[in-house]
Amino acid sequence: MKKMMVVLSFMVLASIILVGCGATPTATPTAVPPTVPAKTLPDLGGKSITVAVENAYPPFNSIDASGQGVGWDYDVVGAICKLLNCKPEFKQSAWDGIFPAMQAGEYDMLADGVTFTTDRAKIVDFSTPYVEVNQYLLVRTVETRTAEQMKADTNAKIGTQIGTTNEIAAKAYFTGKTIQSFEDFGAAVLALKSSDIDGVVIDNIAAVGFMNVDPGVFKLAGQIATGETLAFVFPQNSALKDPVNAALAAMTADGTLQQLNKKWGLTP
């Protein structure tokens, strides 16, 4: 019994010495909360995944002055791949035709501030939503008409991006008007800036993104539609969807997603 006590005393003393020498237990990675341990997240083994983006949709994605792709999509997908052990390869792609391309499996993932719709969900799969947006009318700061007044003004020219839920909202709100649909929002906003059109129907997050690019040039003239959710897109039955959802859950639990949403203006 005494021998056992001596052994125990020695073990306690050894543990104290180790602590005093700075030995620490292995820490859980900060990107993964205790509620979602790292070992529960899938390991993609360093796999490269192709991620489609427009690079013309701030704050989600754009090209900076140095020619580098920047934005919420780049930061969030990068954080997801750190958790899942994968390598994102961002591929610039035009919006027009992107859903048939996703359906055909030309890309592993689409990250472009995409709105979930039941029609789209028939040909592609969506991740869990990461934010909710509303549709607004973006105008020049010198504009005196509200969205309602432009709706009644037969001379008001309205633009948006082709093939988007913004286009659907524009046609539903501005009934009787011919909506000018552009290849991307950058072209629509440029037309607005040059006074070729009077307003652009766009979601509130992207609107703020373009307002930040050209401070003092644009403002919001009124809300058009509400309650759309944005999510990542995958080909149907993609093996990548569940791992991405798991990573999003981990990032939500530890606050990483909220921090990146705030950094890029998705949330206040």
Image (cartoon, rainbow, N blue to C red):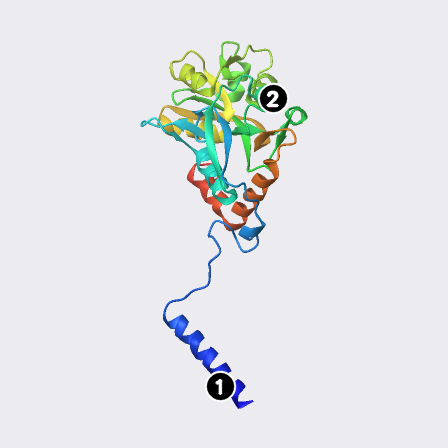
The residue identified by callout 2 is 104
Residue at screen point 50% across, 15% down? 158
* Residue 268 visible to the viewer: no
| Residue 93, horizontal then vertical, whole percent | 48, 21
Q: Is residue 188 above or below residue 82?
A: above
User: Considering only order in the chain, which callout, 2 or 1, is on the residue closer to the N terminus?
Assistant: 1
Residue 209, by quadrant, is: top left
Regarding mark 1 in the picture, which secondary structure is present there?
helix
In the picture, measured across the screen, residue 21 lies left or right of residue 98, that is left
Q: Residues within 10 Å of mark 1 (few under 14, many from 20)?
A: few
Question: Please, what is the three-letter code of the amino acid marked with disc 2?
Answer: Ala
In-front residue for pair 109/119 = 109
In-front residue for pair 146/4 = 4
In-front residue for pair 186/61 = 61
Regarding mark 2 in the picture, which secondary structure is present there?
loop
Question: Please, what is the three-letter code of the amino acid marked with disc 1?
Answer: Val
Quadrant showing the N terminus: bottom right
Q: Is residue 135 above or below residue 4?
A: above
Residue 21, by quadrant, is: bottom left
Q: Determine which of the numbered discs, if any, sits on residue 232 in the image.
A: none
Whether tag 1 and tag 2 are in contact, CB under 8 A, the answer is no
Mark 1 to mark 2: distance in Å?
A: 70 Å
| Residue 191, horizontal then vertical, whole percent | 42, 14
Q: Is residue 163 above or below residue 35?
A: above
Q: Residues within 10 Å of mark 2 (few under 14, many from 20)?
A: few
| Residue 11, horizontal then vertical, whole percent | 47, 78
The residue identified by callout 1 is 6
